[in-house]
Each structure stands twice: as C-alpha cells, then as structure tokens.
Image (cartoon, helix red, strand yellow):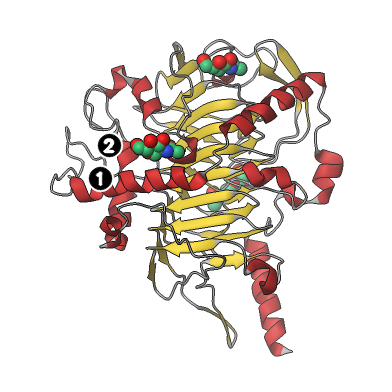
Amino acid sequence: MERSLNIFLFLLCLAIMTPTLNANILESDEYWKEERPEFDSYWQERAKVAKQDNHAAYFPDPYAVSGNFTASISEIIAGKSTRRNLGGGKGGECLATNPIDRCWRCDPNWANNRQKLADCVQGFGRNTRGGKGGPIYVVTDPSDNELLNPKVGTLRHAVTRNGPLWITFARSMLITLQQELIMTSNKTIDGRGVDVYIANGAGFTIQFIKNVIIHGIKIYNIQVREGGMIIDSESHYGIRTRSDGDGISIFGSSNIWIDHVSMRNCSDGLIDAIMGSTAITISNGHFTDHNEVMLFGASDSYSDDKIMQITLAFNHFGKRLVQRMPRARFGFVHCVNNAYTHWEMYAIGGSMNPTIISEGNRFIGPENKFVGKDQINAKEVTKREYTEEKVWTSWQWRSINDEFLNGAFFVNSGPELKNRPFSRKDMITAKPGSYVGRLTRYSGILGCRVGQPC
Ligand SMILES: *[C@@H]1O[C@H](CO)[C@@H](O)[C@H](O)[C@H]1NC(C)=O
Ligand SMILES: *[C@@H]1O[C@H](CO)[C@@H](O)[C@H](O)[C@H]1NC(C)=O
Ligand SMILES: *[C@@H]1O[C@H](CO)[C@@H](O)[C@H](O)[C@H]1NC(C)=O
C-alpha cells in the first residue's frame, strides 16, 4: 500500500514536472477525431503526391544503407586516427570529428560553397538535396506578422516560394513564429555563420513534401498556436487547426535531413515524424530539457508507418531529458554513435513491432532515485510500451557494440543479426565509449566563422 502510494507520488511529481507525460497530442484519439485537419482538395492532392514520393524514397533493403553508414564511420576512425583534427577551436582549425562533418567543415571556403553541404548527408536521409541547385535566399527580416502575404526577406516568405532555394540569414536573429511555419519541397535552411534562434512561438511543419535540409539553428520554447489562415505555398493558403507545439513536425514527408540543431523545451515533441514519413537522417543534434523527445509514428492503427526509415547519428541526448529518444512504431530506426547522457524514464522505446538497431552508442544510466523508501530504477535503456513479453520477444531490437555506463542496460529481442551487414565493425569496437565522446563533441549549433574552417 505504502509502496504504491509512493510510486503514485513519484508519478505525480513527474506529471507536475512534465505536464505532457505520455500525452503527445498526436497519440490521442481525440486529435484524430476532432483536431485532425480536414484537408481541402489542395492538401488532398499534396497528400497523394507525397505518398508516392515517400514510397519511392523507401529502401527495400535497409540493412544495406545502415551497413554502408557504419563502414564509413569505421574508415574515419580507423584510417585517419593519426591525423589530429581535434584541436580546441583556436582559429583556423578544422574541428570535424565524424564523417558527416568531415565532408564540409574543413573547407575554409565553406561560406562560398554552402551547397556542398547537400552532398554530406548519410544514412536513410542520404538522398536529401534540400535546395541544392537553387538560388540563395537571404533572410533579412526576423518578423512574422503577415501569415497570408509574408514580407519579402522573411523566413515565411522564403519557405513558401516555388522551386529549390538555399535559405541563409543576413545576421543573427531571433524569429518568433506567429503560427506554424509550413514549408515546401526542395528547401535548405542554413544557419551557419550566424546565430538563428526560432523561439517562443510556433514550430516547423514539414507536411506532404520532400527534400528538406535544416541545419545550424536553435529551436526552443515552442508553443501550441491556434491556427487560422496561413500561407502554405507560393499560390495557396488555407485554414489550419491548432498546431501541435512540436519543434519540428514531419508529416507524410520524405528525404529530410536535420543536422546540427540545438533544441529544447517544446510543448509537444522536439521532433516528431509520422504518417508514412521516411528517408530521414537526424544527425549532430543537441537535445536538452524535454520530456517526450522524438516520436516516430503516432498511431497504432497506422501501419503505413512500416515504410518509416530513420537514422539517428552523432546526436547528444543531454540534460534533463525524460523519455523517447526515440519512441517508435512500425518502422526501422538505426541509432548509431549517439551519446545518451541523461534520461529519467527510458531512452529508446516503442510498440507495434518497430525494428531498432542500436549501434556504437554510449548510454549512461540515470542515478537511482528514492521516493520514500522505494528505489526507482530507470537504468534500462529500452521500453516496450503496452505489449506483453510473449509478443515483443520477436521484435528485432538489437544492441551492437554499445557502451553502457553507470548500470545502463539494453534488453535485446528478436533474431540476432547473423549475416551482419556492418562490415569492418571491429574497428569501431575497440573503444566505442571514447569514440562517441569525440564523434558527438560538436553536436548542436556550431560557431562557424566565414573564411575559416569550421
Ligand atoms: C553501399 O556501398 C556500395 C559500395 O560503395 C554500393 O555499391 C551500394 O550501392 C551501397 N548501398 C546502398 C544501399 O547505398
Ligand atoms: C523538387 O526538385 C526536384 C528535382 O529538381 C523536382 O523534380 C521536383 O519537381 C521539385 N519539387 C517541387 C515540389 O518543386
Ligand atoms: C518552456 O517554454 C515555455 C513556453 O514557451 C515557457 O513558458 C517556459 O518558461 C519554458 N521553460 C523553460 C525552463 O525555459
């Protein structure tokens, strides 16, 4: 009795601290009954095209992609380890410590060669080109007052133009979005060289589109906004219901690469990917101060999320995170070389038979907590939600060469990977923990300066 009361009190504390506990809006039936936008014919058409694009972006043999990714990390670590490029950030040094960064950060001329970044993505999002080939659009105006006819020079004007655009920023700026920022295909948002903060308003919506790169911006304190009439492409606007309060919401979209973002404290997820979204890489991110960090697939009845393929690489899941790094349904998640330094409930979870390959990550278990006399132990990395063991025991959740500190442990299930696609794995095995520290050392936004290696 006392025990259950204590656990109750503990949960109550958590619930007070994290009001959205287990309550991602997208997971509630009410959302799908009432809140889900009734798409007009314009959005129905976009949905139809996006569905074809998403299926085209799906890799029938995901192991081949994740295998290639791992091999290239091994090459960096094993082949070039004698080349010290890990200096302390004094001017002129290249600080790249992982294969994605090495592709562009060492180029002192990166600022005149920004679109080179589009060649650097790896993992499931590897075909993402963003706005490559299009003109540079320089955002000069941080305001967001015009939702139907945004001013030239604003971010909303930029992301709603037709055709590919590479969007940069004239100077450091804080942008408070009055309503969700509805993006269009073939765009790169590139915050390198200045400090771009998206904060205290609505977040990004990537809905029924393809080919988006978001790089080098900070997103925090994102709130639910009530919706209304909002421009959603150069020649269309329409009524939108409440936005979810996600930092970045990926909805029925493919070929998305999110790199070097810093994110914290959004009212729903930091990054959610749902409704058949696929071909996504989230890399070099730094995430803190949040309850439900990433949700991949929101509905138990939406089995189209089987095509969802997402790579999480070189991210730092940092201070004051609670759970869902990620929480997946149906799809395939390759979680590679991430540093998990803080979680309160669990790190990686899911339901509905997702495949999770956790490789070369470093997991540092949380301290046991005492609530009264009861010890709350959250050292298990994994959590199978709402499923009996006899069911989840066949789900393929495998840990390979992960490093576990402070009592952290991963509960494997499903078939072992026998014919392992991960070639040259031993090179990464040697000291996985210390590699993760190096590989994720520059996660989040970078302080790149024009004219110097970054
Ligand atoms: C993996 O790499 C090999 C050799 O570089 C290449 O032939 C193959 O197409 C790649 N596979 C995928 C799925 O990218
Ligand atoms: C995006 O770019 C691709 C390749 O250039 C092009 O085929 C496609 O039509 C573009 N999509 C949109 C919606 O502009
Ligand atoms: C988190 O964001 C909300 C909404 O913007 C804000 O009211 C709150 O103060 C933020 N919390 C922290 C710790 O920054």
- On the image, the x and y values in percent for residue 432 come to 31, 61
Relative to the observer, which residue lies in front, 360 or 390? 390
Callout 2: SS: helix
Q: Is mark 2 within 8 Å of ligand 1?
A: no
Does residue 64 sit above or below 42 in this rendering? below
Q: Quadrant of ligand 1?
A: top left
Left or right of 96? Residue 365 is: right
Relative to the observer, which residue lies in front, 49 or 200? 49
- On the image, the x and y values in percent for residue 195 come to 40, 31
- On the image, the x and y values in percent for residue 148 come to 70, 15
Q: Which circle's residue, 1 or 2, is located before the other in the chain?
A: 1
Whether residue 178 is visible to the viewer of this picture, yes or no, is: no
For mark 1, what is the residue?
A: 76
How many numbered circles are shown?
2
Whether residue 312 is visible to the viewer of this picture, yes or no, is: yes
Q: Are marks 1 and 2 in contact (CB under 8 Å)?
A: yes
Relative to the observer, which residue lies in front, 174 or 440? 440
- On the image, the x and y values in percent for residue 108 come to 21, 25
Q: Amino acid at mark 2?
A: Arg
Q: Residue at x 58, y 40 (%)?
A: 247
For mark 2, what is the residue?
A: 102
